[in-house]
Image: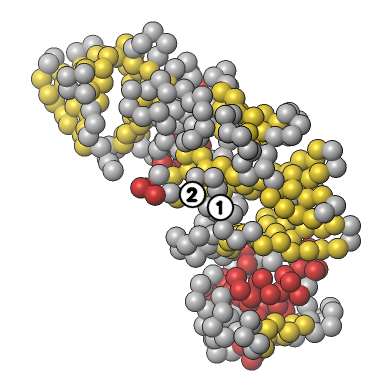
């Protein structure tokens, strides 16, 4: 996930820093000399056992990354260090940032730092350091449960803005959900004179109460690969998201297959108190070749061994076929575009004619005919 550029020392460091079941490697006694920057602090387990001491953040990170503790994960040690040493909020943690299971992210205003952790497919955890005046405090938001049973993931984006003296923070990260559906979670927090807390600022139209977090579904993992996270316009305080939210109202369910199959933008617009959901078909899809932006709704995305294919519903009721090499991004020009397609209810196939060729996109395969005779059949990948 992240690039490692140095050799044996850094590779060894990263190996131990990313282990979920840390070991006590030989050689911890050969710790290099570190400059003592503050009085020595002692990390103690919940059972009262002393694990290690440190008198600088350099020393603490070295011991964590080299597994110089017994039967505790790096995440457990990190929490202890954050609680004991407020200056850790300004420490870079260059080694721990290279660990795939631990994410450290700073807000633009410098008042908040998020620490995320996930072991395998387990529920992720989120710790937040925040500043009030000159004081640094630590808030734990373990579980960060969303409205419909999902959980916040490792943070991938951290946005912030201010309204009437309150600082708002939104943590964005990819999520996996039951049945293989893939999307991302958006969790909101606020910081004011009373401290750091959950922020219930997402308006779900007909719901009586605002939500603190949302789970947003991608209709297909192939879109996810290119779509990333949409974007946040800080000037207008508007989120532009490239996918339908399951559970929200006003979803444009124009597609014949599945109401989630759309990659049009919706907007979350800040009204001074909360983010209000709005559909905006005028916003172009930046994850698709620009000339293909005149569709009404995405109908189908499939892949064969060499191609990826997209079928869109058009404003006149017909369908459009576009295909790319599998390794080419959606923003590139398609190898083939065929318009004025139809849907055959009898076979359940989208049918397209291009001179002497006919393309039939079914549920499981693509069939190609020439002058009415089948010349190829390509099974879709799972």
Compared to residue 377, the image places residue 54 above or below, namely below
Q: Do the residues labelled 2 and 1 touch (CB within 8 Å)?
A: yes
Q: Pointer 2: what residue?
A: 149
Q: Is residue 57 above or below residue 24?
A: above
Looking at the picture, the colour scheme in use is secondary structure
Q: In which quarter of the image is the C terminus?
A: top left
- Residue 337 sits in which quadrant? top left
Instruction: Give the class, few, some or many, for how many residues have Cα within 10 Å of label 1's Cα (few <14, many ≥20).
Output: some
Give me the disc on residue 145: 1
- Rendered view: 184 above or below 339: below
Q: Counting other residues with Cα less than 10 Å from the Cα at mark 2, is it few (<14), some (14-19), or many (20 or more)? A: few
- From the top left corner, tell me how far across and down residue 234 is, in percent: 73, 34
Say which mark, if any, is on residue 381.
none
Residue 111, given in percent of the width and then of the height, sits at 80, 53
**In the current view of this chain or complex, which residue is farthest to the front?**
208
Residue 11 seen in this snapshot? no
Residue at the far right: name it: 133
Q: Where is residue 380 in the image (x, y as percent from the top left)?
A: 25, 37
Which residue occupies the foreground of this view, 301 or 195?
195
Look at 42% across and 31% down and name the residue there: 260
Residue at x-position 41% and y-position 41%: 221
């Amino acid at each position: 996930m992240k690039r490692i550029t140095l050799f044996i020392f850094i590779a060894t460091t990263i190996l131990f820093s990313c282990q979920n079941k840390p070991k006590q490697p030989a050689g911890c006694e050969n710790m290099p000399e570190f400059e003592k920057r503050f009085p020595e602090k002692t990390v103690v387990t919940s059972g009262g056992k002393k694990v290690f001491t440190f008198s600088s953040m350099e020393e603490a990170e070295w011991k964590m990354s080299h597994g110089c503790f017994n039967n505790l994960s790096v995440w457990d040690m990190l929490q202890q260090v954050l609680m004991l040493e407020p200056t850790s909020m300004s420490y870079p943690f260059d080694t721990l940032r290279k660990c795939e299971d631990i994410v450290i992210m700073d807000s633009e205003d410098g008042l908040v730092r998020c620490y995320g952790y996930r072991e395998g497919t387990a529920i992720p955890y989120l710790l937040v350091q925040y500043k009030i005046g000159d004081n640094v405090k630590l808030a734990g938001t373990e579980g960060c449960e969303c409205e419909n049973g999902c959980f916040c993931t490792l943070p991938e984006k951290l946005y912030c803005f201010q309204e009437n003296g309150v600082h708002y923070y939104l943590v964005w990260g990819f999520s996996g959900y039951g049945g293989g559906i893939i999307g991302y979670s958006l969790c909101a927090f606020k910081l004011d004179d009373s401290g750091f807390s959950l922020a219930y600022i997402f308006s779900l139209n007909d719901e009586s109460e605002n939500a603190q977090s949302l789970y947003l579904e991608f209709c297909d993992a192939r879109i996810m690969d290119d779509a990333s996270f949409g974007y946040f316009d800080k000037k207008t305080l508007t989120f532009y998201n490239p996918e339908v939210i399951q559970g929200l109202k006003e979803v444009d369910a124009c597609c014949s297959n599945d109401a989630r199959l759309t990659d049009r933008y919706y907007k979350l617009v800040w009204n001074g108190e909360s983010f209000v959901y709005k559909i905006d078909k005028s916003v172009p899809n930046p994850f698709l070749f620009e000339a293909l932006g005149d569709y009404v709704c995405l109908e189908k995305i499939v892949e064969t061994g060499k191609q990826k294919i997209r079928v869109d519903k058009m404003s006149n009721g017909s369908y459009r076929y576009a295909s790319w090499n599998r390794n080419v991004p959606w923003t590139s020009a398609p190898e083939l575009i065929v318009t004025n397609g139809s849907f055959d209810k009898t076979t359940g196939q989208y049918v397209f004619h291009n001179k002497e060729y006919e393309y039939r996109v079914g549920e499981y395969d693509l069939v190609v005919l020439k002058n009415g005779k089948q010349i190829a059949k390509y099974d879709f990948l799972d």
